[in-house]
Image (tube, rainbow, N blue to C red):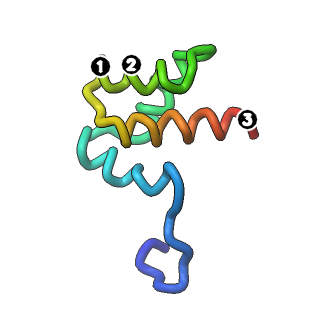
Amino acid sequence: MADDPTSEPIKGPASYFPSIEKTYGKKMSHWFDLVATRKGAKHAEIVNWLKNEHKLGHGHANAIVAHVKAASKG
């Protein structure tokens, strides 16, 4: 539970997710699905695509791509 003071704070790319959803008005699944369409592209290429085509900030775009790339390795 998010309000539980004994819970671990969210770290890494996921710490950006609430802000991304609030700022851009779309669920994270929307962004993950978009990134999944860019299979084979390099990390920086996808970040730049999100920034240019979808107007995300650099940190938000980087967090999304890092999360998707890490999840696909596991």
Residue mark closest to the camera, 3 vs 1: 1
Residue kind at label 2, given as amino acid type? Trp
**Image position of 74 (left or right of 38):** right
Q: For the residues labelled 1 and 2, say whether their Cβ atoms are less than 8 Å apart.
A: yes
Where residue 65 appears, as percent x and y from the top left, is 51, 33
Q: Residues within 10 Å of mark 1 (few under 14, many from 20)?
A: few
User: Residue at horizontal 34%, vertical 36%?
Assistant: 58
Where residue 24 appears, as percent x and y from the top left, is 25, 39
The circle drawn on residue 69 is: none
Residue kind at label 1, given as amino acid type? Asn
In 3D space, how far apart are the residues under numbered discs 1 and 2 (Cα atoms)?
5 Å
Where residue 47 appears, as percent x and y from the top left, is 43, 27
Q: Tell me which numbered mark, 3 or 1, is placed earlier along the sequence.
A: 1
Q: Residues within 10 Å of mark 3 (few under 14, many from 20)?
A: few
**Image position of 52 (left or right of 46):** left
Q: Quadrant of the C terminus?
A: top right
Q: Looking at the picture, does residue 59 appear above or below residue 18?
A: above
Q: Residues within 10 Å of mark 2 (few under 14, many from 20)?
A: some
Judging by the rendered image, the residue that carries numbered circle 3 is: 73
Task: Label 2: state its secondary structure.
Answer: helix
Task: Label 3: state its secondary structure.
Answer: helix
Judging by the rendered image, the residue that carries numbered circle 1 is: 52
Judging by the rendered image, the residue that carries numbered circle 2 is: 49
